[in-house]
Amino acid sequence: MTKTPVVIGEKVVKEKVVVEKPAKKIAKVDNRAKRRAGFYWEDDQPFVSVTTVLGVIEKPALRYWATKQVYWAMALDPSLSEKEALAAPFRKSKNAMRRGTLVHSMVEAYKHNQKYVNTIAEPTRKYAQAFYNWVTDNNVEVLVQEKSLVSRRYCYAGTFDLLVRFKNSGRVLVVDIKTGRGIYEEVFLQLSAYKHALEENGVFAELKVDPEKVGMAVCNLQTGEDDRPTGNYQFQEGEDVFNQFLAAKYLWEYKNKASLDKINANLPPEKRYTRLDIKFETIGKEVKNENHR
């Protein structure tokens, strides 16, 4: 099985807005239709999705949330069967996914018509208003939106939300649009993967942007305790944690070795999934992990 050498431990390094077309525009490319079983398939070769990789990280807050949904389902309707009560978190999750899809459609529409917010029904309109407030407050120019990227060097793929420029400061950031009550630190693992895939695919070079100066941030269109949009947004920047993302990918590959071997058994050598071969750095010397095959 082919392996990609990686080193862990080194530095990887208020006015009304009229959104103008950037001097250099990158076409939107959304290849999520090519995604199946947690992989993007590009030219019949599998690349694990960024979100699939991050599923390996324990999320206690999510487990607590799911338990709470079951509790409230039973409290509101004691006649529910065990199966119906246990399905409550999945119903909520599907609602959140539909909400996210709708919000991303609003983001796309904004590029074409800034007055689109007035046509959106309540209460969803408050998500749109929160997004437009963020755009206005930061004088945002959208450079690239919802572009699917493949990292052939590290064998992963994903679709990021936005690459933007704050026109007042000139800063460029990879931005993820969320809807919820808060921001989780794991999202910066996701954004780091997208940032490095953008660099690998030459997007920064095409836009004449210095990769070292590209930041990462989350714009969370806030949801209240009643599961309805508040009309407010939360914006948070984070650091590049690409090494940590690679470590998560390495762990995911370890836990899914049997599945990866099964996939590769049905592919020609040049199309097989490429696992990471990580070299861990210790004090004073580099030690290669010989157990990874």
Image (cartoon, rainbow, N blue to C red):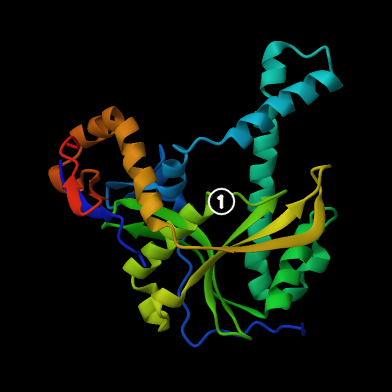
275 up-or-down from 82: above or below: below
The number of numbered badges drawn on the structure is: 1
Residue 151 image point, x, y percent: 32, 58
Image quadrant where residue 86 sits: top right
Compared with 262, 147 (above or below) is below
Measured as percent of width and height from the top left, residue 251 is found at 35, 38
The correct choice, above or below, for 205 with respect to 242 in the image is: below
Tell me the residue at 27%/34% (across/down).
260
The secondary element bearing badge 1 is classed as loop
Task: Decide if residue 188 is on the left or right side of residue 103.
Answer: left
Pick the quarter of the image with the N terminus: top left
Residue drawn at x 53%, y 84% as measured from the top left: 22
Is residue 237 visible to us here?
yes
Query: In the depicted view, which residue is nearer to us: 223 or 268?
Result: 223
Q: Is residue 253 left or right of residue 178?
A: left
Horizontal placement of 277 versus 227: left or right?
left
Judge whether residue 40 can be spotted in this image.
no
Which residue is identified by label 1? 185
Tell me what residue is drawn at x 63 percent, y 62 percent. 236
Residue 241: which quarter of the image? bottom left
Q: Amino acid at mark 1?
A: Glu
Q: Quadrant of the C terminus?
A: top left
Give the quadrant of residue 178.
bottom right
Q: Position of residue 229 (x, y in %)?
A: 80, 52
Residue 192 picture location, percent across and down: 44, 59
Residue at x 20%, y 37% (from the top left corner) = 292
